[in-house]
Amino acid sequence: MNTLTPNYDRPVEIADHIFWVGFNETSSNLHCNPYLVVGGDRAVLIDAGSRPDFPVVMMKILQTGISPDKITALIYHHPDPDLCGSMSNVLDICANQEMIILSDPGNNVFLSYYIEREKRQCLRSIDDYGDTFTLGDRTLRFYRTPFAHSAGSFVTYDEKTKTLFTSDLFGSQSRQWDLFLRLSDACPTCRDYDHCINGREYCPLPDILEFHQKVMPSGKALKHAMDVIGSLDLEMIAPQHGSILTGKKDIRFLIERLGSLSGVGIDGIDGIA
């Protein structure tokens, strides 16, 4: 695994048999990150991406050496089109009669509108699996983070690598983007984001904080999500937008920073108590 100079034209193995299969979005600041998780001879695709992104995502999957018919589950953390728009394409290309679509029951109502009626029988609730999905030698666990940012939002934890797939949480509309985000030891003490304590021209923290203030509905919902995530033993956070976090100190700092963030969603509108 090379986290220093990844080749964005290829899939990037971010942890043991976990592949980033997105691309470097240069026309906007909203990078979308689908992930392929392989266990044994099967695979799961997480937050597969939009319809326009589908050709690139599928090309990256093929480059991993995984045959599409080995993808047995699609996991969608919430029903937004940047995650789910390619759902019908994925089902058609993979041509796996046993493929299931896993999400929270509240999300499945909306996910059903992305696919033809005859395909809706593949929709499954994470409740039906006891919030746990086994994939070969690895176990994926699901933790609810309601209203962060949809009512049915949840995160997915890979026990084998201690990787947490967080969808919009920890995401960003990054003005400057790299697949991996590394903070310095001085970053947690800095609050003057216009004047980097390390002398860098770009600080990623304002983009991360502003994204959560705009996308999350309230500080209460965001704090609850951080409380849930803060209870887990984490080595990596892999969001659907923005950059991947790999340092325990960085992860702990951002959990605390987001958990105490003010002006989130409706809380940031003047005159509303």
Image (spheres, rainbow, N blue to C red):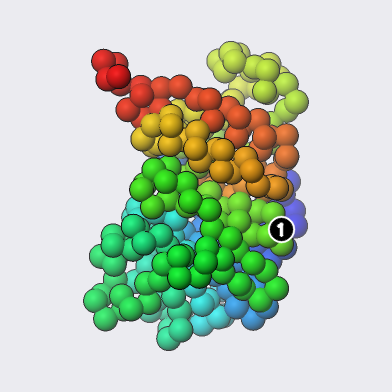
Q: How many marks?
A: 1
Amino acid at the residue labelled 1: Thr
The residue lying at 45 percent from left, 65 percent from top is 127
- As displayed, is residue 253 above or below residue 84? above
Q: Is residue 37 shown left or right of residue 116?
A: right
Please tell me in which quadrant of the rendered image residue 161 appears.
Answer: bottom right
Of 159 and 90, nearer the camera is 159
Residue 192 placed where, x, y %? 58, 13
Label 1 crowd (10 A; few <14 / some 14-19 / many >=20): some
Q: What element carries label 1?
A: loop
Of 27 and 116, nearer the camera is 116
Residue at 36% from the left image edge and 48% from the top image edge: 151
Residue at horizontal 55 percent and vertical 15 percent from the top: 194
Residue that sits furthest to the bottom in the current view: 97
- Which residue matches tag 1? 161
Q: Where is residue 140 in the image (x, y as percent from the top left)?
A: 60, 63
Q: Which residue is drawn at 36% across and 62% down?
A: 105
Q: Tell me if residue 3 can be seen.
A: yes
Q: Quadrant of the N terminus?
A: bottom right
| Residue 57 visible, this angle | no
Residue 76, by quadrant, is: bottom left
* Left or right side of 84 for 241: right
Q: Which image quarter is the C terminus in?
A: top left
- On the image, the x and y values in percent for residue 51 come to 35, 62
Image: 180 above or below 61: above
> Could you tell whether 241 is left or right of 121 in the image?
right
